[in-house]
Image (tube, rainbow, N blue to C red):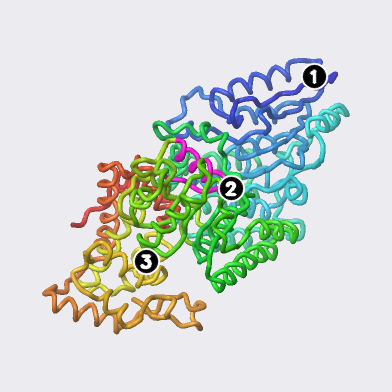
Amino acid sequence: MDGVRVITLDNPPVNALSLAYCAKLLAAVEAAERDAAVEAVVVSGANGLFSAGADVNDFRNELPADAITIRDVIAAVERSGKPYVAAIDGNCLGGGLELALACDYRVASARAKLGLPEIKLGLLPGAGGTQRLPRLIGARAALEFMLKGSSVTARRALELGILDEAVDGDALERALALAATAPAKRRLSTREAFIGDDIPLQAGPYVLAQAHAMAPPEERGGLAAHKLIDAVQAAVELPFAFGLGREARLFDQLVRSEPSLALRHVFFAERELPKVDGIDLSRAAANAVKSAGVVGAGTMGSGIAIAFAQAGIPVVVVDTDDDAVDRARQTVMGMFMYQVQKGRLTQEEAWQRAQSIAFTDDWSRLGEADVIVEAVFEDLDVKRDVFRKLDGVAKTAAVLATNTSTLDVDKMAEVTKRPDRVLGLHFFVPANIMPLLEVVRGNKTSQESLATAFRLGKALRKKAVLSGNAFGFIGNRMIFDYLGEATALAEEGVAPARVDAVMKGFGFPMGPFAMSDLSGLDVGAAIAKARGGSSARTDVLEQLVARRRLGQKTMAGYFKYDKSVGKGREPIPDPEVETMFADAARRAGIAPRDVSDDEIRDRLLRALVERGRRLLEEGVALRPGDVDIVYVYGYGFPPYRGGPMWYAQEVGALSHA
């Protein structure tokens, strides 16, 4: 179009604004500025999106003195006397959105997603986002947007005031038409920041103080949040140029901080998960999972079925227990109606998803499924019977998976005529919510079957981690040692409530004893028995199970529970259990001793780390980062500490014997 220059962000696959690419982008901006024939500029993106933001790899090293960053590009756009229009399609995230904010106008397609997710990496928007967004939509709305770090739809971005227009058609076409009208410059740098449309500027200190109060403490993962709030405070109180300087200093502090380094480790570890020698995900393309089956309509089976339905994969659930099926139907409808109430689904979407789950007692209905997951009682003989039946009804190409959390996958595969198509898919409760999925490779599992499992994990939006076929795989094998160390501490006179308090202080959502109560002490005792006995030196667990103190489900376990306190989920210390440990320890000849909080923390973490190292040596886990992903996403290890292996290596704080 005459007089309008289009600058296209084209750095596949996600148009990352890397240092190398920003140099090219700056040259394009400067060329447009020099060209007298150019009256306006439109910035758009190739590859079906605008830009996913900065290349996180660039943060791994100190920037060269002559490095050109997105800040330089944005400064050039800011200096230009020509109007800029951002044509946004697909993802517009991080530095990509900051570039769009530097433009005078923003037009987006209906499918666009906009966000500033830096907080998830322990960072803050460092290219003017904390200064421009409060000037555009107000400090309160900007804080909420940036602290959540989630992307929003074009419609929501328009409501917030981030966009000028959201169009059903082609955003580039509309942006070109707008640019052709030679619109006026609208630099956000010339505006005064405001708190909110209905909030006087004098209320700024209160709004900011409230934000600080709601953020986690700095030592509990809230460092980036507090620095971000400080940056927005600068937008409210300082001239634009000074605010930019303050933002840059805060960003540089965060880049070097331990929480950000840990979170970026988790980010890169996630990227490495599907990179397994011999597994080519493209090999599974022709056999993508289009239909699924689940055997067992219990809590786990229902959750797995919901996970499939949420991914748009129709699923058949087989169970001969009518009561279990009725409960499962109620669970399914309750879950989807809850999502309607939260505004995440429409009534029609909820109905469609619920209808994509079929319950039956007819095993032959599984005949067309591409993958079938058994989720029956944790008993090897029962599971082997299921696999014999599945081998007779499933199509030849189907992948047969077990959801076992501890049992031998090869023992199940050997009762089939297709051991190459058998593997483990260990979901975590609740299966439709928890993001972790352990993919367990049997001795004869084919590479194609593994590739299908990883593609399925991606479709289900799970973090799929490959594990060897060993007792407890990665996560549960490590947790047994962790729980064993917690028991040893209790035997030495440390109250279970104190052990839990120390680990919650470290950042876990709950301590080891409360976690045991949540899982069910009968489950733990059964696993210990199956292994040939417990590693604990006393029999307190067996005593609790014998007294029907099974955890939360019986309102008593290591702790007591009261429905009037935290809806029956808040652990209440029980002196009776402490006495049981003391009596059992005395019988076993274990003397009580003084134990510091640091020793409690270090002994429990060391139990995880030492078992993790052994699993790596044995080849059960491929990489330290895989172990960290399992613990961050499956067991509540605080992500801002990077996972047990990262923490031990980078922090080196496990000093107590």
**Mark earlier in primary sequence (2, 1):** 1
**Residue 399 in the figure: left or right of residue 344:** left
Which circle marks residue 368 in the picture? 2
Instruction: Tell me the element at label 1.
Output: loop
Residue located beneath label 3 in the image: 511
Q: Position of residue 136 (x, y in %)?
A: 73, 46
| Residue 376 sits in quarter | bottom left
Which circle marks residue 38 in the picture? 1
> Label 2 sits on what residue type?
Glu
Instruction: Tell me the element at label 3.
Output: loop
Chief secondary structure of the magenta portion? helix
Question: Which residue corresponds to the image point at 79% horizontal and 15% vertical from the top-left?
Answer: 36
Between circles 3 and 1, the one closer to the viewer is 3
Q: What residue occupies the far right of the structure in this picture?
A: 181
Part of the protein shown in magenta: 448-466
Question: Which residue corresponds to the image point at 67% horizontal and 43% vertical from the top-left?
Answer: 114
Question: Which residue corresponds to the image point at 35% horizontal and 72% vertical from the top-left?
Answer: 521
> Label 3 sits on what residue type?
Gly
Residue in the foreground of this view, choosing between 317 and 654: 317
Name above or below for residue 48 compared with residue 5. Answer: below
Other-residue count near label 1 (Cα within 10 Å), few / some / many at <14 / 14–19 / ≥20: some
**Mark earlier in primary sequence (2, 3):** 2
Residue 123 seen: no
Q: Label 2, label 3: how many angstroms apart (C-alpha)?
A: 44 Å
